[in-house]
Amino acid sequence: MSCIGLTGFPSDCGANIGGVKKLWIAQLTDVASVTINGQYSHIVDSIAMFGGARFVEWRILPGNCSYTVNGSRDDFGVIEWLHTVTVKLNRRLGRPTSIIWDTINGSRDLVCLILDANGNYWLLGWPFGMYLIGEGGSGTNKSDGSTYSMTFSGESPKMELLISEDDIPNIT
């Protein structure tokens, strides 16, 4: 549903649902180009990958992934955005988790593609990439459970970038 806000710009007045439904990861070096819309600096007109490379889906459980984008401005007026994607693992699954961990833990120059619960696709980590770090532990009591998380983090001169659903089959 669309409605007109106080400034005369149309805005979506439908439900706003939190959460991430899907997460894809790619190496920054696999992204050939990202063309930003000339009028709107946070909208991607097109995205292309090198040599048939694709974003790889990282399967997540519902309610276990989120992202944030925090802006800051330095003394010279330069605005930087910190992109952070956090994935919670309910438990460490031994070998499967270790393979993922060993493959990308500490990796730099990653980019994340996210499908949020509102049906929007977002590109994070462009153009400088993100790195992955993790943390975890056993908890204190039986009811605490294990708490492991993997966090992608990186700075960008832009907020998260909105990608058209039409571009998704070409990159995933």
Image (spheres, grey):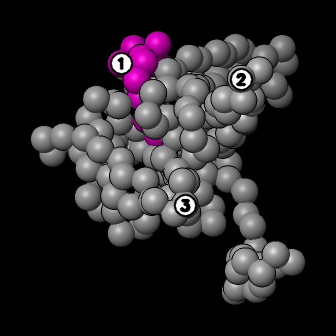
In front of the other: label 3 or label 2?
2
Q: Nearer the viewer, residue 142 or 9?
A: 9
Magenta segment: 101-112
User: What is the x, y in percent for residue 34?
Assistant: 35, 47
Query: Which residue is found at the position 57% from the left and 41% from the top?
Result: 158
**Element under disc 2:** loop
User: Which residue does the numbered mark 1 point to in the structure image?
Assistant: 103
Residue 32: x, y in percent? 25, 40
- Residue 5, compared with residue 98, is above or below; it is below
Read off the residue under disc 2.
76
Q: Residue at x 70, y 80 (%)?
A: 10
Amino acid at dot 3? Tyr
Callout 1: helix, strand or loop? helix
Determine whether 113 is above or below 106 in the image. Answer: below
Q: Are marks 1 and 3 in contact (CB under 8 Å)?
A: no
Relative height, residue 46 to residue 154 (above, below): below
Residue 39, image x, y percentages? 51, 63
Amino acid type of the residue that numbered disc 1 sits on in the rendered structure: Thr
Q: Earlier in the sequence, mark 1 or mark 3?
A: 3
Residue under numbered circle 3: 40
Task: Classify residue 13 by image quadrant.
Answer: bottom right
Say whether residue 116 is magenta.
no
Please tell me which residue is depicted at 42% across the width and 67% down the height of the picture. Answer: 165
